[in-house]
Amino acid sequence: MPKRIEFVEDAPSYEFGRDSLRFRAVVDGKEVKCRVTGEWLMQVCRSSGMSREAMLTAYAANKAKIQTAARKLIEQLPEGQEVILRTGR
């Protein structure tokens, strides 16, 4: 049975120690934490760098692409598991 996936429409939060952005999804009524790494943004979205500003700009410009990739992972992962978009997957 397909999962009902909705992304929360708030700004992503920057995680300095992880060089990533955190955003949220709601899957079948339960919140799932999602993260996209700066490296993934540089490789897939052509981000100009790993700074907070560069990552937020890349996220805003590629939000649909990021959510599509996260949706694919959500469909594959066990319920409630954190979703991480990173290179090498």
Image (cartoon, helix red, strand yellow):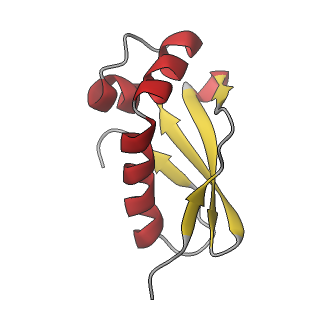
- 6 relative to 9, above or below: below
Q: How many marks?
A: 0
Residue 60 falls left or right of residue 18: left
Residue drawn where x is 41% and y is 11% of the image:
49
- 54 relative to 44, above or below: above
Residue drawn where x is 52% and y is 75% of the image:
78
Give the percent coordinates (x, y) of residue 18: 59, 29
Give the percent coordinates (x, y) of residue 13: 68, 30
Quadrant of the rendered image containing residue 35:
top right
Give the percent coordinates (x, y) of residue 21: 58, 32
Give the percent coordinates (x, y) of residue 10: 69, 38
Residue drawn where x is 63% and y is 75% of the image:
28
| Quadrant where the image shows the N terminus | bottom left
Quadrant of the rendered image containing residue 71:
bottom left
Residue drawn where x is 58% and y is 49% of the image:
34
- 87 relative to 45, above or below: below
